[in-house]
Image (spheres, rainbow, N blue to C red):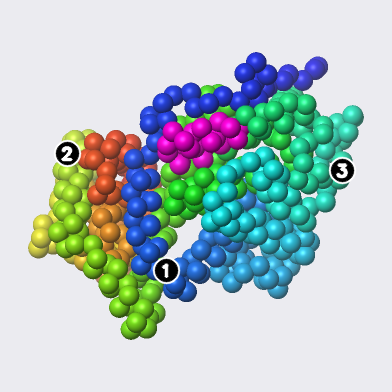
Amino acid sequence: MSATTHHIWQPETGITGIEVPWQQLAASEIDSIKKIWAEQRERLKGTSQLTQFTERLSREWAIETGIIENLYQIDRGVTQTLIERGFQAEFLTHGSTDKPTSYVINLLRDQQDALDGIFDFIKQQRSLSTSYIKELHAALVRSQDHTDAQDPFGNLVEIPLIKGDWKMQPNYPTRNGVIFAYCPPEQVASEMDRLVSMHQAHLATGVAPEVEAAWLHHRFSQIHPFQDGNGRVCRALASMVLVSAGLFPLVVTRDDKNKYLDALEAADRGNLALLVDLFAALQRSQFRKATALSENILASGTGVASAMQNLVKVATKSKQARELEQKKVFNHATALEQDLVAYLESLVPDLQQVMLSITPKGTAFVRRSTDANSHYYWGQIIENAHKLDYFVDNSSYRSWVTMNMAWNRRARLVFAFHGIGRPFSGSLICAPFLEFRDLDEDEQTHSTVVPVTDEGFVFFYTESLEQIKQRFSPWREKVVAVALKQLGESL
């Protein structure tokens, strides 16, 4: 039985531009992340904390970009040590990786050096070219001398890896009887010239960075111009676009792999939206981590001169301007809270029936915070924030909306609204969690906090309420669906 061919790169058209107006794909929160991160970077300029954050981000990128490609595997605990302390062979203990230690360390250093090279490329204000893409490939695969290939009989064999030059033979993998066909070698050079030209045209017309990063990544992957290492180059080029725009490098982790592959397959079918959405979500994730930087500096203590410089920078923005920023995002929060109350109250009748079917005293009801009780759930909020990896600030804004349920147990689905990072920069987060409250053998109440999402909902003063609600509605429904599933397992 002969294999069928699935064309990733279309012979009739080659790579194509962005099929729909790019504005339809853009994520409304990205401009806000860019602006607020630029302000925070300026405040933190010259601090060791900013340097350490950048280095840790670079090391995480280097580790995960190879794991995604199955170049090696590294245990999660060891991964964190490498991110925090650097690429030292002694951290790769026996059994923590599936490849020789020296080989893995060399790959990690090559990949980190390649990303550092991208930062230098951006600082030098160079324009993307095919020659630079070849340089990037050579840097990424510097310590990789061989790659896998299939012989005429379908056996997997090792062959020498061509570094920094286009492929000489087709690299069409076969899976489950299907041949996945990329651009043939004889057309790679012309297609790569087209890719660079189209990319420059997109930059000239102001295509949003998350859209351009997704487009460039996918179209490059369709061409697959190198014998091996294409995935690493894809993510490096996407990072180049994002960092050039003042955003974070594209860190796709092993936990993101399934979503990542699904988004790429959707892009193969002409739907780039899932890839754009994933890139935007990864930017939000890095933004949440970055919000802890200022707090870390405050906690560790800085010199008077440095602190005074930061104070002057913050003070240059007028008090009136800051108040306008705060008021706008606070009004957004109020609107989202009203939306949540209405949505949750629509669920109360059905939940009430479920509770009453278990016990005559079963009940379900919605509550919203007041000024007098907005400080409730502080301990649970901190615990949940650690799991979601961000810094809580309740000095600028705090409120909550809860769905309360009681049967022979008590539970609350809590949507907590508060600041994220310090000083306040015009962004808030809605961080939900499910809390169970039970009596132990000594009749003492104890609380169990159960996460219901892997990402809190961050929103910004620069977004319109309509944009925020468009993002909030599907997120809110996913959270409630997860919470109801968790609730069902506890009944």
Q: Residue at x 51, y 40 (%)?
A: 213
Decide whether residue 103 is among the magenta residues.
no
Decide whether the magenta segment is chiefly helix, strand or loop. helix
Which percent across, then down, holds residue 326? 19, 56
Q: Earlier in the sequence, mark 3 or mark 2?
A: 3
From this view, report whether residue 350 is shown above or below residue 21.
Answer: below
Give the labeled residue for mark 3: 159
Crowdedness of circle 2 by 10 Å Cα count: few (<14), some, many (20+)?
Answer: few
Which percent across, then down, holds residue 54? 51, 63
Which percent across, then down, holds residue 445? 26, 66
Give the labeled residue for mark 1: 45
Callout 2 secondary element: helix
Depth check, mark 3 against mark 2: the one in front is 3
Q: Is residue 286 left or right of residue 483?
A: right
Give the labeled residue for mark 2: 342
From this view, report whether residue 328 is shown above or below residue 100.
Answer: above
The residues bearing labels 1 and 2 have C-alpha atoms spaced at a distance of: 44 Å
Span shown in magenta: 195-216
